Image (spheres, helix red, strand yellow):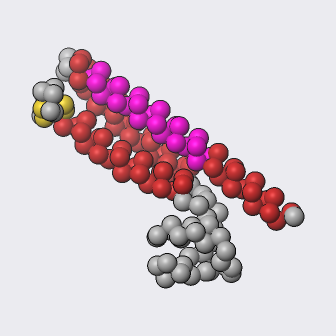
Amino acid sequence: MATIRDETGRRLPLAMLLFAATQEQFFANVYRDAYLSQDQCPSCRYDLRGSTGECPSCPECGGVWRRVSLTLDASSTLRWFGWMSLVWLVVVGLLLMAEAVPFAVSFLSVYLFVAWMTIRSHRRLQQRLAQTMATAEAGSTS
């Protein structure tokens, strides 16, 4: 199995490093969507709470955006996670069949951590969406 030595001299499987790189981009997108408020410009995050109209333009960068509520397609996130789960279970299974138990255990620990992070971030996004919807409903009734 192809490995790389880190600064401490430990051997890390290349597949684990590749997986970590893909997860970093995934979580960057999830957290960007979670913290991007509907009152901010999507490109420069300038606060647009005082602007009016359905399609205000940003005075900072000149971008035009539509007011939409914070949404994240939960099914696509969970579908992606399901495919990655399948890939990692196959990798761990192959490592166990090849009697590479230390590598399989390290892959499994990374997989469990990523699963926990995905579920945690998904719950946070759902809470953020619920808060946004509650705020919008409270504003429309008053």
Give residue 33's position: percent from left, percent from top: 51, 56
- Residue placed most toward the observer, 45 or 138: 45
Residue 70, quarter of the rendered image: bottom right
Q: Residue at x 34, y 37 (%)?
A: 87
Bounds of the magenta span? 104-126
Give residue 78's position: percent from left, percent from top: 51, 44
Q: Is residue 67 rendered to the left or right of residue 9?
A: right
The quarter of the rendered structure image containing the C terminus is bottom right
Q: Is residue 90 magenta?
A: no
Q: Residue at x 54, y 53 (%)?
A: 34
The quarter of the rendered structure image containing the N terminus is top left
Q: Is residue 112 magenta?
A: yes
Q: Is residue 90 rendered to the left or right of residue 119?
A: left
- Looking at the image, which residue sits at the far right? 142
State the predominant SS element of the stretch in magenta: helix
- Residue placed most toward the observer, 119 or 53: 53
Q: Residue at x 46, y 70 (%)?
A: 43
Residue 134 visible in image: yes
Q: Residue at x 44, y 42 (%)?
A: 81
- Residue placed most toward the observer, 132 or 90: 132
Image height check: is 51 above or below 16?
Answer: below
Give residue 97's position: percent from left, percent from top: 24, 20
Residue 11 visible in image: no
Image height check: is 103 above or below 13?
Answer: above
Give residue 66's position: percent from left, percent from top: 60, 75
Q: How many numbered marks have been drawn onto this rendered protein structure?
A: 0
Q: Is residue 69 rendered to the left or right of residue 2?
A: right
